[in-house]
Structures are given as C-alpha cells and as structure tokens.
Amino acid sequence: MNKARLQGLSAGIIFTTTIFAAFYYGTDKFEGTTPTAEEAKKTVQPKDPDKVIMEKEASTYTIKVKTNMTTAEIADLLSKEKIIDDAAEFKAYMNDRDFSKKIQIGEFVVTNNMTYRQLANTMTH
C-alpha cells in the first residue's frame, strides 16, 4: 500500500468518525440514558457459570451416577431436582472443559448453590 492510499484511508476514517460523533452528540440521543441501579447491576454482572448464586435457598440432593450414564442424563437429573437451572448449559460446560470424560460412578451429594465447577469437581474426583 503506497503513501497516498494510506493517507486517503486515514482521511476517510477521520471523516466517518466525525460524522458519527456529530450525529450522536448533535441529536441529544445520549442524554437520559443513564441506567438505573438494577440495570447497571445486570450489565456489570455477566452470566458466569462458576459464580455462586447466593439468592437461592440451599437444597441438597444425592445424585447416583451409574455405569454408562451420559452427561446429558446427569444434567437432566440435576435440572429436574432444581440443582441447576439449565441442563443444556451445564452439559455444554462439562463437554467444553472435558469433565464429561472424567465423571466417576457413585453417589455424590450436591447443592443448588454449587457452581458448575464445584459440581464437576464433585463428580470427577
């Protein structure tokens, strides 16, 4: 790319940015868009499967993992017992982090306040 093309591209970017800025600040669209405390809290707190949700009342469940039980079956069981909210999300978490290959057979006590990581560690160790 030669010098003239680069200068032309730079000028175009500056011109476009100026037009967008003029429209944004010139139309008063940015005023009055301050979020409420609740909206800000939702925006700042991304959905993180490793985060403990303390708002729920704690409940325990003993899951019995049997031979040839799939991650989907385990996720459905946990969802049915209200230990997790979303079976598909938990299954994806287990598969993405290779926990589904390490699930042990046995009985495990889990609670609805456990993170996905805590649930995975409980069933894989």
Image (cartoon, rainbow, N blue to C red):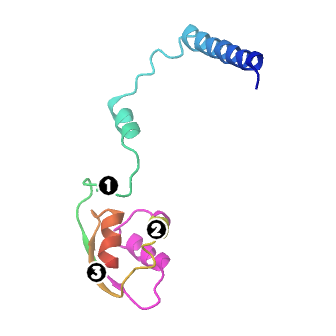
Q: Kindly state the secondary structure of the residue where label 1 is placed.
A: loop
Determine the CA span between mark 1 and mark 3.
20 Å
Q: Nearer the viewer, residue 42 or 23?
A: 23
Q: Which residue is drawn at 41% across and 70% down?
A: 79
Residues drawn in magenta: 63-89
The x, y position of residue 23, in whole percent, is 61, 12
Local crowd at mark 1 within 10 Å, few (<14), some, or many (≥20)? some
Name the residue tied to disc 2: 87
Q: Kindly state the secondary structure of the residue where label 2 is placed.
A: helix
Name the residue tied to disc 1: 51
The x, y position of residue 30, in whole percent, is 50, 17
Name the residue tied to disc 3: 108
Q: Residue at x 76, y 15 (%)?
A: 4
| 8 is higher (above) or lower (below) than 100 | above
Q: Which of marks 3 and 1 precedes in the sequence?
A: 1
| 46 is higher (above) or lower (below) than 59 | above
Left or right position of 27 against 62: right
Determine the CA span between mark 2 and mark 1.
17 Å
Do the numbered discs 2 and 3 sit on residues whose CB atoms are within 8 Å? Answer: no
Res 116 quadrant in image: bottom left
